Amino acid sequence: MSQASFPNARTRDTFVSPIVESRRWLQGLNLPPEMPLLNLSQAAPADPPPEGLRRAIAEAALTDDSSHLYGAVLGRDELRAALANKMNRHYAADLCAAEVAITSGCNQAFAATIAALCGEGDEVILPTPWYFNHKMWLDMQGVVTTPLPVGGAMLPCPKAAAELITPRTRAIVLVTPNNPCGVEYPDGLVRRFYDLARAHGIALILDETYRDFDSRDGPPHTLFQDPNWSDTLIHLYSFSKAYRLTGHRLGAIAAHPDHLFEMEKFLDTVAICPAQLGQTGALWGLQNLDAWLAGERQELLNRRAAIEAGFAPLATRGWQLLGCGAYFAYVAHPFDIPAEDLAKRLVHEAGLLMLPGTMFTPEGDPAGTRQFRIAFANVDTGGIKTLFDRLSNWTP
């Protein structure tokens, strides 16, 4: 293998995906039967979609020949229109189908957005702890990540962000409800970032992958009610979490049609079109699963409540609950051990797989060595009690 041509320095120099890395910790794992592994690492539903949605996909596979052909790069017209209508109800907005595109997952939505916005050496402000795939993609595109440390409430500060803006800054990225911290960003905070981005002529990229599990009733923010929202806002979404369509890879972008025109060039070269059968499932979900999705949201809110109510025994031992919501709890541990080392020990000694904060923070950030992300998407209230029991009884 020629070292001059392979690997590319950008892929070599970014980190390995934390999900991939943490799975390696399980190699050779041999836990006692009374302590099965509790996997709290990945923020994705493990169960399949509801039967009705699966039947819709199966029927399309058998009877809709177009399901097996290339489709529109920006997604099926009927799905774009249905998602626009859903967003209008959710945000009290007035979007049209031309302002919505379907992508092969929300990660691809982010990648297409960056491709359309940024060139070599441009900068993007990313609150830290960050969603690791955002940082990885910026690294691989030669875009400079400008970290914005969050405050004690795990909320980013617009004033601090303003001080980081340079002539090379192209965007600020926010994720709400947040991954990895779980916190829901208040409307007023999101608005201040929107106003900041507009004042500087840069984009606000707002990733709301977990919006369906927000605890608030009514619109979580009012940005879409601004008639000029698309001059500044680029909105990202995922069907994976709402309808358990992770394997079908479906995400979405809401943006100005001129921005989507540029993103289309990127999308055409990497996937040509989103998966047709997945789009059929997403459309059926939008049309039929509102009540079911409300039940899914309530279940996640119940788990959040169980974490908040049951955290007291850990608090007495020095653990801190820094944030909680959507699929996540974000915690600080009390031990004089780096979080990455502690994470590996907890797998073997307590049967717990959690991701350390070092996977969500810049290299050398001392905060990351004290923190963990707990993903409870696939752990019911009984599993949450087991988590707390094991952590309470574990000592280094």
Image: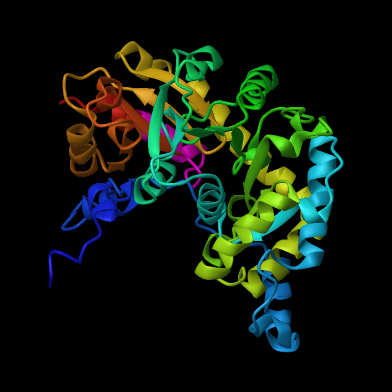
Front-most of residues 267 and 310: 267
Q: Residue 387 magenta-drawn?
A: yes
Q: Give the image location of residue 93, x and y in percent.
A: 84, 38
Whether residue 40 is visible here, answered yes or no, is no
* Residue 330 lies in quadrant: top left
Horizontal side of 58 relative to 7 (left or right) equals right
Front-most of residues 30 and 373: 373
Q: How many marks?
A: 0
Q: What residue appears at the point 70 percent right and 46 percent down from the top-left corner?
A: 255
Up-down: is 215 above or below 253? above
Image quarter hosting the C terminus: top left
Front-most of residues 235 and 327: 235
Farthest front residue in view:
167
* Residue 389 lies in quadrant: top left
- Residues shaded magenta: 376-388
Q: How is the image coloured?
A: rainbow
Q: What residue appears at the point 51 percent right and 30 percent down from the top-left corner?
A: 182
Q: Give the image location of residue 307, x and y in percent.
A: 49, 27
Image quarter hosting the N terminus: bottom left
Q: What residue appears at the point 24 percent right and 38 percent down from the top-left corner?
A: 350
Up-down: is 39 above or below 150? below
Horizontal side of 12 relative to 3 (left or right) equals right
Q: Give the image location of residue 153, x and y in percent.
A: 49, 15
Q: Give the image location of residue 321, x and y in percent.
A: 43, 20
Q: Residue 314 magenta-drawn?
A: no
Whether residue 292 is visible here, answered yes or no, is yes
Q: What secondary structure do most residues of the magenta stretch adopt?
A: helix
Horizontal side of 344 relative to 122 (left or right) equals left
